[in-house]
Amino acid sequence: MIKSWMVIGGVTFLVAFASSFVTPSERQWFRRLQRPRWLTFEAAIPLIWTVIFICGAWSAYIVWEHNPGTGTTWLMMGLYLLLEIFTIAYTPVMFRLRSLRIGTIIGGTGFIICLLVTIAVLPISIWAALLLLPYLLWSPIGTYTTWEMIHLNPQDA
């Protein structure tokens, strides 16, 4: 029998994998952009997001196991999926449109969705809510960084 953590982890991985479909010219566009001088941790960003996705999947697992298969739980899984889709959309959509403004909007929207999911999860499990804190702490940093890049690269706003 397939375990719920396997399904949640598999869906998380498949959705995250979808963001890897960007062209070399799109990557080149992003590489040439100027960054804020204080952005010294850029190499750590993939690891940071990996931890955040693991925490999010673990949170979803806790919520699922609390009351598996009910309509409310399925709705919560849909909210987790919506959050991941918005999070993953940041790179391919911003790269494809070559718009830092779009990236900032997607990043801010992801934060709002995560905040709503966290509030919805809190009555179900404090641990599930706490596992969303890395997202809530990191997302504003990423969004602010993208917003700052608009000022350094006005032609790519």
Image (cartoon, grey):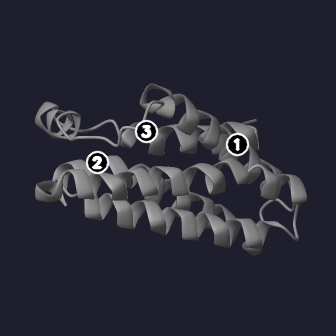
Front residue of this view, candidates 8 and 84: 84
- Name the residue: 60% across, 42% down: 53
Which residue bears the numbered disc 2? 92
Q: Residues within 10 Å of mark 1 (few under 14, many from 20)?
A: many
Element at badge 1?
A: helix
Front residue of this view, candidates 4 and 15: 15
Q: Which of the two discs, 2 and 1, labels the residue nearer the N terminus? A: 1
Q: Residues within 10 Å of mark 2 (few under 14, many from 20)?
A: some
- Name the residue: 61% across, 59% down: 80
- Name the residue: 65% across, 68% down: 115
x then y, percent, for residue 77: 66, 61
Q: In 3D space, how far apart are the residues under numbered discs 2 and 1 (Cα atoms)?
A: 23 Å
Element at badge 3?
A: loop
Snapshot quadrant of residue 63: bottom right
- Amino acid on which the number 3 mark rests in the picture: Trp
Q: Is the Cβ of the residue at disc 1 closer than 8 Å to that at disc 3? A: no
Nearest-to-viewer mark from 1 and 3: 3
Front residue of this view, candidates 144 and 135: 144
Q: In 3D space, how far apart are the residues under numbered discs 3 and 2 (Cα atoms)?
A: 25 Å
Q: Is the Cβ of the residue at disc 2 closer than 8 Å to that at disc 1? A: no
x then y, percent, for residue 134: 68, 47
Which residue bears the numbered disc 3? 38
Q: Up-down: is 118 above or below 19?
A: below
x then y, percent, for residue 66: 88, 58
Quarter containing the N terminus: top right
Picture mark count: 3
Q: Which of the two discs, 3 and 2, labels the residue nearer the N terminus? A: 3
Q: Is residue 77 left or right of residue 26?
A: right
Q: Is the Cβ of the residue at disc 3 closer than 8 Å to that at disc 2? A: no
Which residue bears the numbered disc 1? 55
Q: Which of the two discs, 1 and 3, labels the residue nearer the N terminus? A: 3
